[in-house]
Amino acid sequence: METAGALSVKAPSDAKVLFDGSSLDAWTAGGDKPAPWIVKDGVMIANQADIRTKESFGPMQLHLEWRIPAGREVNGQSGGNSGVFLMGMYEVQVLQSHTNRTYPDGTAGALYGQTPPLVNATAPQGEWQSYEILFHPPKYEGGKVAEPATVTVIQNGVVLHHSRRYMGPTQHRQVATYPENHPATGPIGLQFHGDPIEFRNIWVRPIGEYDAVK
């Protein structure tokens, strides 16, 4: 479908700014390791390793903008691949999906390995894309999942998922299942899949209290 591209939304006053174009202070490569991504011209560029936020979050609204560099060769899952991990466990796919064919649950905005987006809303390569993600973790009762994790994903102003259920934390080529125990909060992760994907204007807002287990 045709899309106007990214909707760039300024962080509201109650948001935690994760990247404002100046530094990677909010991010780590794990433990005490500094995030190795590159910051240039107000953009952070994927490099060397996955990164994650130093802080952890539960129910959230997450805004971020991403771009696949123009002119980069892309073929299926190669050349323009990354991902956003909610609580470090649940992936929303980042991929150059404009005129690029791949398997449905691996396209841009897919709940990777589980559910394709309702529509392909990806703007042409080299243009900025935006994700607005509203996520709620699962709820447990008596050691079992009472309510699965749910997510709403909006790309470039177009709804891709509305309160869609995750089958469990993201797995690669395995059927997702929920663990016996689940944390109340977790970090936001960005994937380095070998491609220099660019990100800007990343912020997050808590959207309610959460108790993982009842």
Image (cartoon, rainbow, N blue to C red):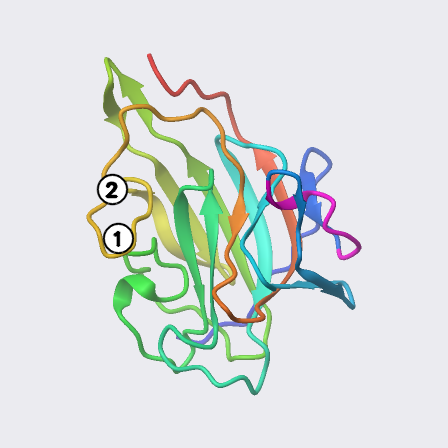
Residue 187: x and y, percent? 53, 38
Amino acid at pointer 2: Met
Q: Quadrant of residue 213?
A: top left
The residue nearer to you, when weighing 58 against 157, is 58
Q: Does the magenta stretch include residue 24?
A: yes
Residue at 59% across, 78% down:
69
> Which quarter of the figure has residue 45?
bottom right
Rendered view: 149 above or below 10: above
Q: Mark 1 points at which residue?
A: 114
Left/right placement of residue 133 relative to residue 162 reads: right
Q: Give the range drawn in magenta.
A: 21-30
Q: Is mark 2 on a helix, strand or loop?
A: loop
Image quarter of the N terminus: bottom left
- Vertical comparison of 210 with 194: above or below: above
Residue that label 2 marks: 167
For the image, the number of numbered tags is 2
Would you say the residues marked 1 and 2 are in contact, meaning their CB atoms lie under 8 Å apart? yes
Residue 11 can be seen in this image: no
Instruction: Tell me if mark 2 has few (under 14), some (14-19) or many (20+) residues whose alpha carbon lies within 10 angstroms of its own.
Output: some
Quarter of the image that includes the C terminus: top left
